[in-house]
Image (cartoon, grey):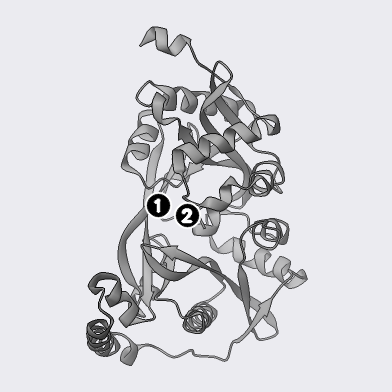
């Protein structure tokens, strides 16, 4: 073991290592998230972020890169103050070099480099049990579970995913819809005031004013100012997002960001991000997401949301069901205990690089 470890080393990586990093990704992940093998995606994510270039760590054996880990620069609003943190992504170890301590070595190197760069803490959203165990071994803490909620759009499509016989799926789906409507839709509360919804393709000064108000509603949240949002959604080189905003009483009251994806084997629309000043605007945006999903002809509308947040309870009352899929919010910090309060955080898929 000791001799094996002496044959490889961890160091900082950069754009010169791009092609070898993408080669490693193709070995580790195959065709999963295929667009991440596009050099444009890599440069957008790691080199062009609004909060600065990413910290990149690679493991080499000879001239070959056999491990990779990275921390994307990210600013957060923590208890009324803007602080610098990171989003840890793309943990990869070559299939021929696993169980040799490379993950742990990269993890310790990353912690040291983040401290040297004066970042307050690190965030990650793992879903694989082995990754979660590995983070905990390095001193990361699990803050909370992030269940994926789903709203059924096409019951026959959902049934056919399991039955593989469309006539029977139509029957089963029809019966399921009747019971679902009895349980949820007949008791759904209507919006208490008129909210206007409009699609946008650029972020004007109303988004800036909205963010100034919305940021005060949360103890801990990743910054969603127009500069970040434009980079994350409008300037993405390979993915297309649809943005709607809610308007009421002469001001912007919220936004929702949607993307068509394959999720859990279903044709789906994902709510990538959603933020609102009040429940009326929130539900108006949810209704727009449902309408959009029906027009798109998908089976499900999905949303990853903290179980500790009021949005979770509102959605469960209004027909969103809990799927078997759940991510984790994990944080590494040796100083800030307030970061580990599960009731202080609001995070969505938009805070990750998953969707």
Is residue 252 among the parts visible in the rendering? yes
Front position in the image: 26 or 302: 26
Question: Tag 2, which secondary structure?
Answer: strand
Reply above or below: 85 against 270. Answer: above
Q: Which mark is residue 342?
A: 1
Q: Which mark is residue 290?
A: none
Residue at 59%, 26% in the rendered image: 113
Q: Determine the CA span between mark 1 and mark 2.
A: 6 Å
Label 1–label 2 contact, CB within 8 A = yes
From what the image shows, is residue 100 above or below residue 22? Answer: above
Q: Image height check: is 335 above or below 3? A: below
Residue drawn at x 29%, y 76% is 160
Crowd around label 2: few <14 · some 14–19 · many ≥20 (10 Å): many
Q: What residue occupies the far top of the structure in this picture? A: 3
The answer to whether residue 332 of the structure is visible from this angle is no
Question: Where is 146 relative to 244, above or below?
Answer: above
**Residue at the (60%, 41%) spot, across then down:** 72
Mark 1 neighbour class, 10 Å CA radius: few under 14, some 14 to 19, many 20 or more:
some
Number of callouts: 2
The residue lying toward the viewer, choosing from 238 and 112, is 238
| Residue that badge 2 annotates | 345
Indicate the position of residue 266 as horizontal and vertical percent values.
38, 68
Name of the residue lying farthest toward the right: 205
**Residue 157 spot, x, y in % from top left:** 34, 78
Q: x, y (%) of residue 257?
A: 57, 69
Q: Is residue 47 left or right of residue 103?
A: right
Occupied quadrant, residue 161? bottom left
């Amino acid at each position: 073991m000791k001799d094996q470890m002496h044959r490889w080393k961890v160091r900082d990586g950069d754009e010169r290592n791009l092609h070898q990093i993408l080669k490693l990704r193709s070995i580790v992940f195959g065709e999963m998230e295929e667009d991440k093998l596009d050099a444009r995606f890599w440069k957008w994510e790691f080199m062009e972020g609004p909060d600065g270039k990413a910290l990149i760590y690679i493991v080499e054996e000879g001239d070959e890169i056999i491990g990779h880990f990275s921390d994307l620069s990210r600013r957060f609003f923590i208890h009324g103050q803007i602080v610098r943190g990171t989003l840890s992504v793309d943990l990869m170890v070559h299939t021929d070099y696993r169980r040799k301590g490379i993950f742990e070595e990269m993890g310790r190197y990353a912690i040291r480099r983040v401290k040297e760069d004066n970042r307050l803490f690190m965030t990650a959203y793992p879903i694989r049990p082995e990754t979660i165990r590995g983070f905990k071994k390095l001193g990361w803490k699990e803050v909370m579970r992030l269940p994926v909620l789903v709203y059924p759009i096409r019951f026959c499509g959902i049934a056919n995913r399991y039955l593989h016989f469309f006539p029977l799926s139509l029957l089963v789906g029809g019966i399921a819809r009747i019971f679902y409507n009895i349980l949820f839709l007949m008791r759904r509360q209507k919006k208490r005031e008129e909210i206007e919804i409009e699609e946008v393709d650029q972020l004007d000064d109303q988004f800036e004013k909205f963010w100034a108000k919305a940021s005060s509603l949360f103890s801990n949240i990743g910054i969603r100012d127009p500069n970040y949002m434009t980079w994350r959604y409008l300037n993405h080189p390979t993915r297309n997002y649809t943005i709607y905003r809610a308007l009421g009483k002469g001001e912007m009251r919220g936004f929702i960001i949607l993307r068509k994806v394959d999720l859990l084997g279903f044709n789906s629309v994902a709510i990538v991000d959603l933020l609102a000043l009040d429940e009326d605007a929130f539900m108006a945006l949810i209704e727009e997401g449902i309408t959009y999903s029906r027009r798109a002809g998908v089976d499900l509308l999905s949303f990853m949301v903290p179980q500790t947040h009021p949005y979770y309870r509102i959605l469960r009352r209004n027909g969103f069901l809990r799927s078997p899929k759940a991510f984790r919010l994990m944080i590494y910090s040796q100083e800030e205990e307030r970061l580990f309060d599960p009731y202080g955080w609001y995070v969505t898929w938009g805070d990750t690089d998953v969707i």
